[in-house]
Amino acid sequence: NIYKEALKAYPNNTDILDALGDTLVIMGDHQQAAQILSISIKLSPETGSSKYMNMGQIKQGQESLQYYQKGLQILYTEKDKAQGEEERQSVVERLVSGLSAMAEIYMTDECFDDNAESECGRLLGEALGLDPANTEVLQLMASYKISQQNQEEALKFLNLSKITWINKEPDDMPSYEFRTQTAKLFLELQQWETASEIIEFLLEEYDENAEIWYLAGFSQSFYDPEAALECLTKSKELLVKQNCTSSEILSSVDTCLAKVNEILKSQPPSTENTTTNTTTTTRTTTEQNKMEDI
């Protein structure tokens, strides 16, 4: 409301238009945000990167890429004119965010574009050139390498990303969703115990997430089927409790449960009881012989 009142007095002020557009994007009112930002773009097409970055976020496909590209062009100019390291770093963060957003578009909406693979690699390389230790970009690069079926490079980048946050305090770690994706990528790379380590942290934070219990069971099914059974059973209980209607996750849990039960059935009987019984029999025989000697 404050910005709208200000626009009544200064209808052509692009700073106010950009601020209002940004607020509308955050509020989720993308239709009105696009209208406001379009006015700002017409009034001043060569200044103000934020309106282009917001339009890139609102739009999809090639249209989104075009807005992001224009925003990056302006950001690079802002970077060259930055006064001091703090201002420069702020611009670099926005550049990396924009480059990453474009790379994600090429990995999703525009994945069938003829130049998608090369453009995605170029954008991520450019982002890492600006910030080589960026957690999000390193993980994106891992996803990109997986899409290329380059498992070795994917694991390298995923581990580099993990190193940047794994020993931080919980409040300083990436979002819960981001770390869930990290665990899924490690699972895709068949790094079962590393994935389990991350999943354990997630469960310590929140243990009512059925999907995370499923991921725990899935990863442990490859090296600890008994623990996997407990996790999958917990996942199934939560799905029932939460009245889950997603056939996909229900089917995944049931399939994994069946696999784990088959593994447990195929395992030979525990040798612990056999050893105990043999030891007990031997001890009893020895004692009987001693009694006979007496």
Image (spheres, rainbow, N blue to C red):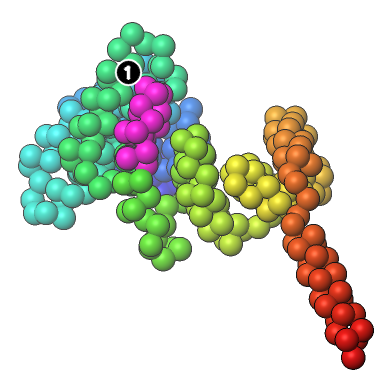
Name the quadrant of the C terminus: bottom right
Q: Where's residue 156, x and y in %? A: 32, 40
For residue 94, say whether it is visible: yes
The residue shown at (54%, 51%) is 196
Number of dots carrying numbers: 1
Q: Where's residue 138, x and y in %? A: 32, 40
* Residue at which label 1 appears: 117
Give amino acid for label 1: Glu
Between 59 and 193, the one lying in front of the other is: 193
Disc 1: CA contacts within 10 A as few (<14), some (14-19) or many (>=20): some
SS for tag 1? helix
Between 22 and 203, the one lying in front of the other is: 203
Left or right relative to 273: residue 91 = left
> Residue furthest toward the top?
114
The residue shown at (23%, 36%) is 127
The residue shown at (44%, 63%) is 171
